[in-house]
Image: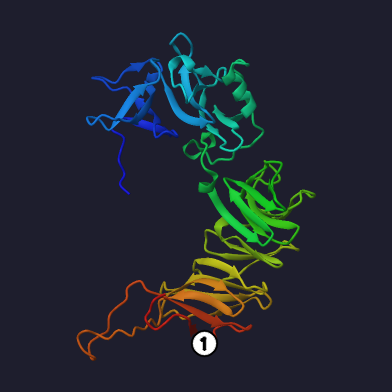
Amino acid sequence: GDVEPFPFAQARDLLPLDDGCSVIVRVKQSSQTQGYVGGTTENLYHTCPSTSSSSSQSKRRITSYVGTEKKPRRFGAWALFLSDNGGSGKPGRMNLWGVPLADLNESKRVKITCAGEMPVLDFAVDPVTLEVTLVVGGSLYTLASSEVEAVLSGSATPISPVQREVYVRSDFNQGLEKTMVPAANHFTTFDATPNLSLSTVRGQAFAFLDSRFFPLDPDNKGRVMSVRYYNTSHALVMGTDFDSWNRAEVGVYLVSLHGEEKAEVLKADGSLKSPRPESFTASGEHAAWFNTDGEAVVLHVESGSTRKVNTWQTSVSSLTFSPDGAYLAFEHSARNQFSQISVYSLQASQVHQVTAAKFNSFSPIWSSKGLYYLSDGDVHTTQSSPWGTRAPGPVWDGRCNVFLAPFEGQAGEALVELTGADGAG
């Protein structure tokens, strides 16, 4: 449908209400933007669709405070927001405040927190439990819903938040350690079986098993880069500083899914040469990945020994194990820069070329029938040329088909085209 903007300049945030109205944050507009000792003023406004034909929206400023009031969030029947009102209309430290949605008036405002020397930078409200999480300085603090409700009802005075026992990992890029963001935007790896799911979120590994959601690194030591299923009792983790703060090398670790054992170091001796965590994969007794040099590496989990797959100076990508774990398919560049697919036999330590370098082949996926992949080679069409039978046929740019390489222990057998002859991949 059509998107209609709010008719207010400098509107920065919005809290929609059940009656169609909204609470917005807006910078004061005049001949000159009003300022004060704390910065540019930001105020809360209550806006509703206007019944007058002259204006599409009516607005009312909630408070007369000359300072900053921002980030309105819903807390049941209340609107919580941040304000640097230090009392008597003078600016001070930023704290958490509330105002009832049924009576959005200045006299109804309630100060909730007393953060002390460090201002509250941001906050979020859990929509289910109504627990409030605050960012104070570079740390996370929490307020139980019962504590907030007690202050709002007048039965308690403003409270000091309790620091959460959580280690926030960050590469310190753009201050991410001080930012609360939706976790779904930060999933980096994911693996699943019928009874288990594993995921990596902002440097931490999590498991969902037997209706329990728990971290795989309960001691909060290290930054997890990737996690993969190994067996019913253990997962494979690629990470840094997982067992010691004195070492920065990337390592591979065997981690218990039940928290009964300490993580076992499989490979963390500085020889991994900057592995690409998104390429980390595992099956049976082995795990594999490729590094920034384009080298594919296979790890034997039980012994901790590693070996390189390829000996040519080309980049490797798209690693995938066969269902029985005996073969590793991967994509690599040929000498003419076309993408090829080859298969590595773990038992024989040999590489078998599956596709030719006359066309591009990529995205290998194993099945019980063999190796599926995409290719732009041998794309046929049933459409005849509009200029006659002797004229060249139409050219399909960027099209590819799905192919199957039947595989019974021997790579490079005849290709079986799965899609129709019209070239639709």
Label 1 Cα neighbours within 10 Å, binned few <14 / some 14-19 / many ≥20: few
Image location of residue 163, percent across then percent down? 64, 28
Image location of residue 290, percent across then percent down? 56, 62
Q: Residue furthest top?
A: 88
The answer to which image quadrant residue 322 occupies is bottom right
Q: Which residue is mark 1?
A: 414
Seen in the picture, residue 193 relative to 354 is either above or below; the reply is: above
User: In front: 274, or 389?
Assistant: 389
Image location of residue 395, percent across then percent down? 29, 78
Q: Residue furthest front?
A: 51
Secondary structure category for the residue under label 1: loop
User: In front: 67, or 354?
Assistant: 67
The answer to which image quadrant residue 191 occupies is bottom right
Q: Residue at x 56, y 67 (%)?
A: 319
What amino acid is at disc 1? Ala
Q: Residue furthest bottom?
A: 390
User: In front: 285, or 41?
Assistant: 41
Q: Residue at x 54, y 84 (%)?
A: 412
Colour basis: rainbow
Q: Residue at x 70, y 51 (%)?
A: 211
Q: In the rendered view, does 324 fall on the left or right side of 53?
A: right
User: In front: 301, or 131?
Assistant: 131
Is residue 92 among what the camera can see? no
Which quarter of the image is occupied by the C terminus? bottom left
Q: Residue at x 59, y 33 (%)?
A: 130
